[in-house]
Each structure stands twice: as structure tokens, then as C-alpha cells.
Amino acid sequence: MVKTNCEQAALPIDAQGTCHAGVPAPWFINGFGKKVYLDNTANTCNYSATYSDLRVSVCGSRYALIREWKIKDWCDASRVLEKRQYIEVGDFDAPIVGHPELDLDRNGIIDDTLRYGVAPFNCFAAFALPSPKIKDCSSTTVTTEIYSWQPETIAGFPTGRIIWVKLDLPIVNGQLQNVPLGTHYFIFKVRDICNQETIDTVAFKVLDRIAPTMICNSDFVVSLGGGGAARITTADVNKSSRDNCDNTDLKLEVRRLIPAECAPDGVAGYSPWGSFVDLSCCDVGKLATVELRGSDRFGNTNSCITRLQVDDKLAPICTPPADRTIKCTDIPAGLDITELAVLQRNFGLPTVEDNCEVTWEELEPIVNLNNCKIGNVTRRFRAIDAAGNLSAGICEQVITVNPVHNYEIKFPKDVVSYCGVPPKDTLLLNEIACDVLAINVEDKQFTIPGGGCYQIFRTYQIINLCEYDDISGPIILSRDMDCDLAPRR
Ligand SMILES: [Ca+2]
Ligand SMILES: [Ca+2]
Ligand SMILES: [Ca+2]
Ligand SMILES: [Ca+2]
């Protein structure tokens, strides 16, 4: 029985058109202990041999030869020896199978590990089934199965063990569908026509190479709170960012562009990535650029940018100086207490507070002083923050000026004059405090008939305009103020 494999070099063909040299002929050991082949070419020592073949197909390129040998012994003409030799030629080996030779990443090098990316809008890969590299002298068929190591569950509960699970995936138009993320294995079963099989296992990976889709809230307004700050979180900026694989695994971070005027070192730049960014009074009235970055668990990143209008809507608070009460005599002569500079110098300044920068201003006062400079002056203030917000309500200081009356009047004594007209203006007034004295002088002249003498009764009426109230009676000064029963002379 001789077997020769079709994987070997082609057999030489003999004169009978069948394989020859590779198939050893029958032999015997002669008297000298030498091996003698009984083929036609040998033709030695009075022996000659010939054969005829019966060819029987087995499978594929495999066939059998039943070789009938006839050996003639020339020393004994009647002696012809017939022997049968069985020769099998063909496919005795299972296919030789190598890993698929692919360059999926297109770098010009056959991939060590096959890597497939998932589709943009779901988390499954779809790709053409790869073919293993096959060497066989017969035709072969390939069966491909996909397996994975997966946690074992019983009735939905994990057992803690990892088991080998066949993935039942659809194939549409030669494309394997719905391949999940992870490491899986192609199991190629390559069978030749003689039912000889080789199994090859090739690992492959399904990866997410699709960056998340980032969707920011469109430009929105942020109003700073107390303390002049606002914290903007990723949730504030994120509208509906998502990933093709797992939104719960999407890591969100924000950073902001800090303009030079708001940067501690005066150089514009980005804040570090984090879960929030802070805005300050420096941003009021401007657009703050905030960037939202999303990273899926495979490290694919994408970002979107929004601009925040930063406002300060908190009004400042104004606290006026305390009300004051003064006497009219406290005001030096010539000082105008309706002038702002005078008021601020003498009656204090307001205090103002705000979440951001704030200043104050004093409005023209409401002056309610009479001619005697008595009454009140209402000072009015308001606080203004950097955003232009005005303090609410009244921020007023009332300065009350109380009257003080103090004056001297010296009435002229009686006078006798010889000839001529006595002077009228001997009345002396001294306004020491806050008084305005108005004088009326009325003369009543009494003449003696035929005589050269006459008498004048002179009455002085004096109104202190700072006390006069239209109702009270006058204070009548007696001509005998010193009570000596005689008018003063
Ligand atoms: Ca084979
Ligand atoms: Ca490659
Ligand atoms: Ca992704
Ligand atoms: Ca404010």
C-alpha cells in the first residue's frame, strides 16, 4: 500500500501515462542480500516486470490505483508471478488555514488584530465577513461562526463565571450585522472535499470610533447673583449632547475663554476643563464664550461653543447719612447749605453696597427754608452700579434747621427839642440770631393853637418776621419799663 499526497510535487508520469517514479516498485532481496526492484528499467538478473493500473476516483483529486504487477522469470519460462500493489494518490491532509490578511486601518500593513468600527448612529458594527487564508489541493468550504466570552447568567442573575457564547448574528448581502462592542472571535471551519477539517480561531475587536454629537444651549443670559458671581455647570450648557454608544458614559466638561481684562495675569486664555466655570462682575455687559466638551468611554471627543450674555440685575443699596437737626445759628454766615459741596463737607456721605462695583451721586436737594433760613433741607442720594442699576426707594437725609431768636432793640428816649424837627432814626436794632425785624414808625403830632410848641407821639411797631404768626397779639412795651412811675427820659 502506497500513499502519495497531492500536496507534494506532481508525480512523474510513466510510459503508461500514470504516476511512476514516486511510487516504489516491488522488490526482493537477491542471494547477495541486495534489494532488487522489479520495474521495467531494472531488468536485471533475468527478471522483468510490467504492470497495469486500474484507477478508482475517491474524492476530489484523490484517487486509487490498483496496480497489477506481472513478473517474468526468464530462467523459468513457465513462471510468471502476479502481484497487486495498491497506490493512493490525492488529498490526505486537512486544509492549511491562516488568519485573514486584511489592512482594515489602511496603513499598508496586514493587521495583527482585526478592528472594526461601529456605525455612526448606533453602537453596532456591520462588515463583510473576512475569509481565512486557505491552502489545500482540493476545493474547500468555509463555515464561519462568531463567539464571545460573556458573563454567565441564570434566570437573569450573573453567576460570576465567564462562558463561551455563540453570537447569532444576521448576515445580509455578505455583511455581518449587529456586531456589538468588544472582543469576539471568528471561528473558521475549513473543510476540504474529503471531509478533512481545520478550525482556526481569530480574535477581532469592535470599537467605537465615533465622536459624540455635541449640542449646546443656544446663547443665553446669565444674571450674576449676590457676591457678583455665577457658576455655570455642564448641565447649564448642555442641551442634548449624545453619543452613538452610551449617553450615560458621556463625560461632559466645560471651560471658558477669559478675556485679557478679566485674567489675573492680563493674558487672555482658557480656564481648565472642569464641571463648571465661574463668571464675575468683570464679565458684566459682555458675551462670555463657554465651550462644552464631551468624551465617550473610548476617548472620542467633540465640543460645542455657546456665548453667554452676562448681566447684573441686582440693584445696589443706598444708605443715607443720619438725619441731622441743627440750630440756625450753627450755620456760619455766608454758608449756603443748599450747595452740594457744602452739604457733603458738613453733613456726611451715603454708604452704598452692591454685588459689583458701585458708586453714588447726590441729586439737588429739596430746600424748604424760609427767609429766616429756618426749615429743612432734604438731601437725596442714589447708588449706581457698574451695570447702570439704580438703588431702589428713598435714600434721603433730612437736615432740620431750628430757629433761634435773639435780638436787641433800643428805643429812643423822650426828647425835647427847641425849634427844628427832632430826628426819627434813633431806633437801634441788633439781630443777634435768626431774626428779621421790620419797623414801622408812626408819628402823631399835637399842636397848641396859637402857640409855637407842639408834641409828637411817636409809635414804633416792630415785627419780627421770623416769629410773627398773624394771630398772636403784640408785645406792648410800657413807656415805664423800669417802673419808676415815670417814663424814661
Ligand atoms: Ca485537503
Ligand atoms: Ca493595517
Ligand atoms: Ca462614540
Ligand atoms: Ca449690581
Image (cartoon, rainbow, N blue to C red):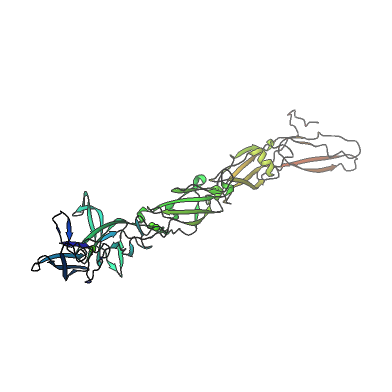
Q: Say left or right for 148 vs 457.
A: left
Q: Residue furthest top?
A: 484
Residue 261, horizontal then vertical, whole percent: 59, 47
- Which sits in the foreground, 107 or 440? 107
Q: Is residue 271 positioned above or below 481 on the image? A: below
Residue 277: x percent and y percent?
48, 48
Res. 40 visible in picture: yes
Residue 180 location, x and y as percent?
A: 30, 59
For the point 27% across and 60% down, which residue is it? 96
Q: Nearer the viewer, residue 194 or 284?
A: 194
315 sits to left or right of 251: right
- Give whichever of 321, 139 is nearer the camera: 139
User: Percent position (x, y) of residue 242?
Assistant: 39, 58
Q: Is residue 85 left or right of residue 381?
A: left
Give me the residue at 50% from left, 58% from top: 219
Q: Nearest the camera: 126 or 310? A: 126
Among all residues in the image, which is located at the extreme front? 75
Ligand 3 quadrant assignment = bottom left
Measuring 81% from the left and 43% from the top, which residue is drawn there? 444
Of the 4 image quadrants, the one containing the C terminus is: top right
Q: Residue 207's quadrant in the figure? A: bottom left
Snapshot quadrant of residue 346: top right
Quadrant for the N terminus in the image: bottom left
Instruction: Pick out the residue farthest to the left.
Output: 78
Observer able to see residue 245: no
Q: Is residue 52 above or below residue 476?
A: below
